Amino acid sequence: MKNALLQSPWYRPLALAAAMIGATLGLWLLLAGVYLWSDNPARPTIRIDAQSLQLTAGEGAPSERGLRVEHPAPNGLVLVQGAIRPFEARDYRGLGWRVDGLDETRELRVIWATAATARKPFDHLISPDERRAGFVTLTADPNWEGLIVGVGLAVVGSTAEAEPLLFEGLTLHPRRPALSEILPLAWNDWRRDLGWTGRSINFTDSAEGASRIRPLIPVVVWCALAALIHLLLAQPWRGFRAWMPYAVILLVGWLALDARWQWLLLERLDQTHSLYAGLDAAERQRVGPDQGFYPFIEAIRDQLGAEPARIFLLASDPAGYGANRARYHLLPHNVRLTATLDAASGVAPGDFVLLMSPLDRTSYDRARSELAFGDWRLAVSSEVSRPGLGTLFRVAPLAEVD
């Protein structure tokens, strides 16, 4: 009976289908583990070390191990809060802590403030079991909602003779997704797009810092699982030596990646059309990624005129995006990128110097109309300036400078 099943003409396609279905289920289980137990880059675990703890009630000082509190406030209160960036309460499930010297005679409470109630913080009494575990779940507390702007611990009932407390750190743990949320999360990560970049015509990748898994990884895992399952179902030593099923598995994986890529390209095309359709070249730049400084470049081009000029563009990072984009927009003018100038730079009267903010090694003497590059000075006249962006200077002999 078994041999008859293996020799059936339907066995090979059924084995391939079973391998693909099994690989899909296996991939889902692996994704479930990743999404349940790994940090979400958008909602990472927040660790507040001892250096970021602030003592707001009580007397103490930082030590090698943490924040050491020697005495409570006159009312017996010790209050420690962490320096944090605001976060949404719905994204975090609870708080962990590391505190030495805390006995059972004193109460331990979590305190937090929201953007709506910054002057009236909330508190939550920590139970004995939670104290032993070093973690409290706050999702059931009705006040744990909204934008959290401050969080800390309060020790109530301390006396002057009580043992000193050592606060080593606090940890905010993100909420883990439910099993029903894993597929939507994986789908959102799969189709997340960085938009157009300098190499995105021929390159695709997931949005680093926002996705937990790059798209190639689940495809490779799926192909490997499908090939392994098919190998077990259609064993070569039983006569199943065809390579076609494995080629089909690889083709399906490749088509999945290519379908994603084509979908992203269509979305980008739609975004590009809605943003730039009907605009001329200058108008496109004014609404594009360089819109923050393109009007400044336009003013420089108007000042330079049509005749190509030599421009020394000084930037803190000459190889960076801003400097190179400015150079591109200034074509056909001859733009040289550099971080500073000296007597050997070949600067001559009639040349232009464009300083892009911020610059630390260059200063401008308004009284003498000179640029100072350390001990070397250059006589200039200011032509175009925009606060926060930069200034264009024209090099001139000292006698011509007002």
Image (spheres, rainbow, N blue to C red):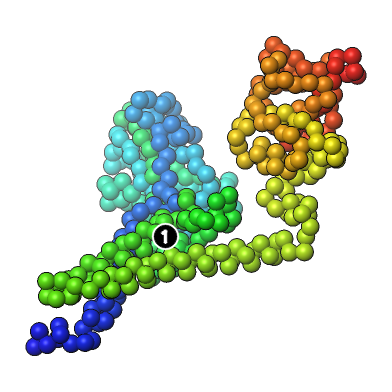
- How crowded pointer 1 is (Cα within 10 Å; few <14, some 14-19, many 20+) is rated as many
Does residue 353 appear left or right of residue 173 in this picture?
right
Is 185 above or below relative to 13?
above
- Towards the viewer: 45 or 310: 310
Q: Quadrant of the C terminus?
A: top right
Q: Quadrant of the N terminus?
A: bottom left
Give x and y (percent) for residue 395. 81, 23
- Towards the viewer: 269 or 359: 269
For badge 1, the amino acid type reads: Pro
Give x and y (percent) for residue 372. 73, 17
Counting every numbered tag in the picture gives: 1
Does residue 323 appear left or right of residue 159 in this picture?
right
Within the image, what quadrant is residue 227 found in?
A: bottom left
Give x and y (percent) for residue 225. 26, 66
x 33%, y 73%: residue: 248
Does residue 116 appear left or right of residue 300 in this picture?
left
x 33%, y 61%: residue: 220
Q: For mark 1, give the secondary structure.
A: loop
Residue 333 seen in the figure: yes
Determine which residue is flagged by label 1: 215
Give x and y (percent) for residue 341. 69, 21
Of all residues, the one furthest to the top in this rendering is 375
- Towards the viewer: 190 or 205: 205
Is 22 above or below relative to 378?
below
Residue 117 seen in the figure: no
Within the image, what quadrant is residue 69 found in?
A: top left
x 86%, y 14%: residue: 398
Is 20 above or below relative to 365?
below
Within the image, what quadrant is residue 234 found in?
A: bottom left
x 37%, y 71%: residue: 252
